[in-house]
Amino acid sequence: MATGHPRVTPVKTHSKQVQAYPTLYNYSAAVLAKPADWNDRIHLTGYWFLDRQEPFHPPDELVEFLADGPAPVYIGFGSIGDRNATRTLQIAVDAVDKSGQRAVLESGWAVFKQIKLPPQIFQLQSGAVPHAWLFPRMAALIHHGGAGTTAQGFRSGKPTVVIYQKFTDYYFWGERVARLGVGPQPLYIRDLKVDELAAAIQTMVSDRTLQAHARQLGHNLQTEDGIAQAIDVIHHYAGKPSLHLAITR
C-alpha cells in the first residue's frame, strides 16, 4: 500500500452469532464478491437504486452547456467538509484547464463563490440534478468516494477517480474503483496536486481499456434489480419462527 494511504486491517465482519440471522447487504457481487467465510444466510442483493417515476427536467442552462461541446467531466465532493476547500476547488479548476476538458463542478461549499470559473466549467449547486440523470452524460467522474455516489458512478458505466479523506469508507471505495479497473488510483485530498489530477482526467478520457471495463460494470449493474432481490429474500424468510432480519448498507 502506498505511503500516506489509510491502513486497511482485516476484520471478522460476522461472528457465528451474527451469521445465525439472515442479513442483507445492498451492494453488488459484481463490485465485491461475497467472502468465502459468509454462510448462506448472508445475501448480497445488489444495489437498491430507487429510480424516479416522474420525468426529470434539468435546468435549461445545463442542457445548453452539455449540448455545446464534448461530454464534460463531473467533479463533486459531496457534503463532506474541507478546511482547505478553496485550495481543493482551485486545484480542480486548474486541472480541468490543464487537461483541456470541460467539466460540471458540483459543490455546496460557500467558497464556491470565491473562485471565478472559466467558461468550460459549469457550476452546479449540490443536489440540483440527480446523479442518476447526470452521470451517464459525463465523460468521467471525480468525487469523494461516498458509497452512494460510487454506486451511481459504477452504474453509469463511466470511469471514476476518488479524491478521498482519511475517514469512513472513502478510501475503500476509491481503492475498489482502481482494483476493478474502472479508474485510476484514489488521490488523497490533502496531497492533491494539479498535475496528478490532470493526469487522472486524461487517463479516464483516453484509456480505452479502462472505459470498456467501466461500461461492462455499468451494464452488469443495470441488469440487476437489487430491490426485487431483497424482497425475494425477505419473502423467503417471512413467516418463519423467531425471524430476525438484519439489513446492512
Image (cartoon, rainbow, N blue to C red):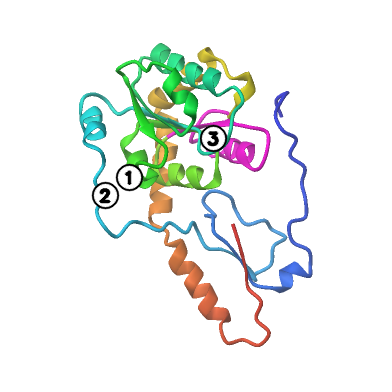
Q: Which residue is mark 1?
A: 133
Residue at image location 43% in from the left, 56% down from the top: 49
| Relative to 98, residue 8 above or below | below
Identified by mark 3, the residue type is His
Q: Which residue is mark 3?
A: 144
Q: Secondary structure at mark 3?
A: loop
Give the quarter of the image for residue 185.
top right
| Relative to 31, residue 115 above or below | above
Q: Which residue is mark 2?
A: 56
N-terminal label among 3 and 1: 1
Q: Nearer the viewer, residue 26 or 125?
A: 125
Q: Secondary structure at mark 2?
A: loop
Query: Would residue 11 be found to the left or right of residue 114 on screen?
Result: right
Q: Nearer the viewer, residue 108 or 50?
A: 108
In space, the residues marked 2 and 1 are separated at their CA atoms by 8 Å
| Relative to 167, residue 189 above or below | above
Residue at image location 78% in from the left, 63% down from the top: 15
Q: Nearer the viewer, residue 151 or 215?
A: 151
Query: Would residue 147 be found to the left or right of residue 36 on screen?
Result: left
Identified by mark 1, the residue type is Trp
Q: Secondary structure at mark 1?
A: helix
The image shows residue 196 at horizontal and vertical percentages of 54, 17
Count neighbours of disc 1 (C-alpha within 10 A) and say few if under 14, some if 14 to 19, many if 20 or more.
some
Query: Would residue 10 be found to the left or right of residue 227 on screen?
Result: right
Q: Quadrant of the C terminus?
A: bottom right
Please state the extent of the stretch shown in magenta in the rendering: 159-185
Residue 199 appears anywhere in the view: no
